[in-house]
Image (tube, helix red, strand yellow):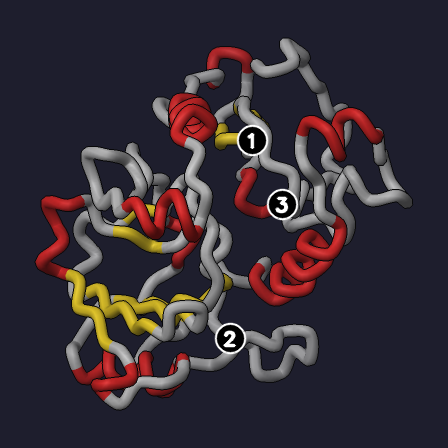
């Protein structure tokens, strides 16, 4: 909707997901969109469709940040399945020994509870003897948690006791890894960001640390909810194109 353009993809062969650029809109398909993996380059890569005005001025494209994200996604694209120890390209940390066979990079929509479910979240740090992702997973197993996450930036371990209420943060990007007893790709996006004034807004974090843009976030959430029903045209599967 930002550009008022309609894109039609005539063949399924070769389709992949943009790994770095965030835009608004909706995708629709005759086959599940979750089966499409991430591209090995961004459309703003110099070797692909780079356009200075769009990429640099409008999108603020950062090649170094994008390269790092793509490197993380190379293993994250396998998030629908458990760790494959026989796959040399699957270099995600293995948390299956703690009962968490599913894991992914938390920069792609990390798990979050709406405020009414916050009692199901338990947080640990170094004072609890937690200093890495493996120790975090062990602690979450001890808590009999459904899922968890380790954020090295803040050195915090999150344990999510129940699956009920969990959703994906739609706007704030963080770093680290999360793990779960069930597929993380099944989670839908939250209807608000953690930095929304009605949720967990903390000025030092939302303004100072992550530079939260409320208007941009509202636009993205509006595109995410609700999904548009295009089954009348033969497209049974839809998802937010951001």
Going from the N terminus, do you reach mark 1 or mark 2 first?
Answer: 2
Q: Residue at x 38, y 49 (%)?
A: 186
Tell which of 146 and 56 is nearer to you.
Answer: 56
Which-is-in-front pick, marks 1 and 2?
1
Compute the Cα span from label 3 to label 1: 12 Å
- As displayed, is residue 171 above or below residue 231? below
Name the residue tied to disc 3. Answer: 36
Compute the Cα span from label 1 to label 2: 27 Å
Residue 220: image x %, image y %? 45, 28
Q: What label sits on residue 100 in the rendered view?
A: none
Going from the N terminus, do you reach mark 3 or mark 1 first?
Answer: 3
Examine the rendering and report whether any part of residue 227 can be seen.
Answer: no
Going from the N terminus, do you reach mark 2 or mark 3 first?
Answer: 3
Q: What label sits on residue 241 in the rendered view?
A: 1
- As displayed, is residue 242 above or below residue 208? above
Examine the rendering and report whether any part of residue 147 can be seen.
Answer: yes
Q: Residue at x 61, y 77 (%)?
A: 91
**Is residue 74 left or right of 118 when viewed as pictured?**
right
- Please report contact status of discs 2 and 3: CB closer than 8 Å, yes or no: no
**Is residue 68 left or right of 171 when viewed as pictured?**
right
- As displayed, is residue 85 above or below residue 106? below
Q: Name the residue furthest right.
A: 47
């Amino acid at each position: 909707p930002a550009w008022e353009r309609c894109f039609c993809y005539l063949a399924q062969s070769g389709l992949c997901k943009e790994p770095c650029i965030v835009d608004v809109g909706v995708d629709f398909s005759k086959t599940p969109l979750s089966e499409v993996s991430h591209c090995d380059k961004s459309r703003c890569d110099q070797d692909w469709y780079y356009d200075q005005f769009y990429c640099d001025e409008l999108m603020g494209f950062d090649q170094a940040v994008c390269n790092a994200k793509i490197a993380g996604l190379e293993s994250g694209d396998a998030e629908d399945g458990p760790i494959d120890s026989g796959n040399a390209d699957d270099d995600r940390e293995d948390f299956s020994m703690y009962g968490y066979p599913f894991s992914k990079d938390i920069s792609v929509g990390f798990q979050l509870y709406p405020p009414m479910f916050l009692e199901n979240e338990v947080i640990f740090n170094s004072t609890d003897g937690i200093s890495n992702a493996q120790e975090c997973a062990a602690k979450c197993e001890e808590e009999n948690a459904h899922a968890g996450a380790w954020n090295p930036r803040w050195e915090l371990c999150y344990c999510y006791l129940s699956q009920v209420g969990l959703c994906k943060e739609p706007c704030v990007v963080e770093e680290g890894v999360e793990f779960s007893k069930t597929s993380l790709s099944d989670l839908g996006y939250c209807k608000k960001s953690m930095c929304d004034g009605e949720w967990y807004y903390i000025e030092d974090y939302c303004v100072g640390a992550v530079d939260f843009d409320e208007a941009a976030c509202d636009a993205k959430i509006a595109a995410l909810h609700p999904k548009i029903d295009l089954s009348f045209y033969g497209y049974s599967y839809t998802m937010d194109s951001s």
